[in-house]
Amino acid sequence: MATVSDAAAVFNDLAESLGATTGFADVGDITVQQADSGRLSETFYRISGQINGIRVIGSEVILVTDANGQIIRCNRT
């Protein structure tokens, strides 16, 4: 996984497991954050839940990838 489009595809593949509607993840709704501590590099892809287009505070899914783009974690808050 290397792009926001890739992250959207993964989020959408997980939609049923997350209790979300199919196709809920849009590229424009995903934020990306890089964390690099020298030896460890991770990328965080985050998307927040929405109801009728309004963001739900505290409802977030986070995909974390390593430096090679491998998904190492998926968290839901």
Image (spheres, helix red, strand yellow):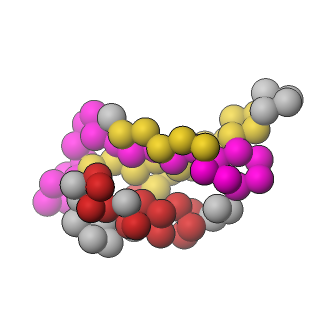
Q: Position of residue 72 (x, y in %)?
A: 61, 43
- Residue 56: image quadrant is top left
Q: Name the residue nearer the viewer: 53 or 46.
A: 46
What residue is at 40 percent from the left and 67 percent from the top?
13
Screen quadrant of the N terminus: bottom right
* Lateral position of residue 11 relative to residue 41, left or right: left
Screen quadrant of the C terminus: top left
* Lateral position of residue 51 relative to residue 2, left or right: left
Q: Position of residue 22 (x, y in %)?
A: 27, 71
Give above or below for 55 relative to 10. Answer: above
In this rendering, does residue 28 appear at all?
no
Q: Position of residue 25 (x, y in %)?
A: 37, 64
Determine the main secondary structure of the stretch shown in magenta. Answer: strand
Magenta stretch, residue numbers: 50-71
Q: Position of residue 9 (x, y in %)?
A: 47, 69
In this rendering, does residue 50 appear at all?
yes
Is residue 69 covered in magenta?
yes
Give above or below for 35 relative to 15. Answer: above
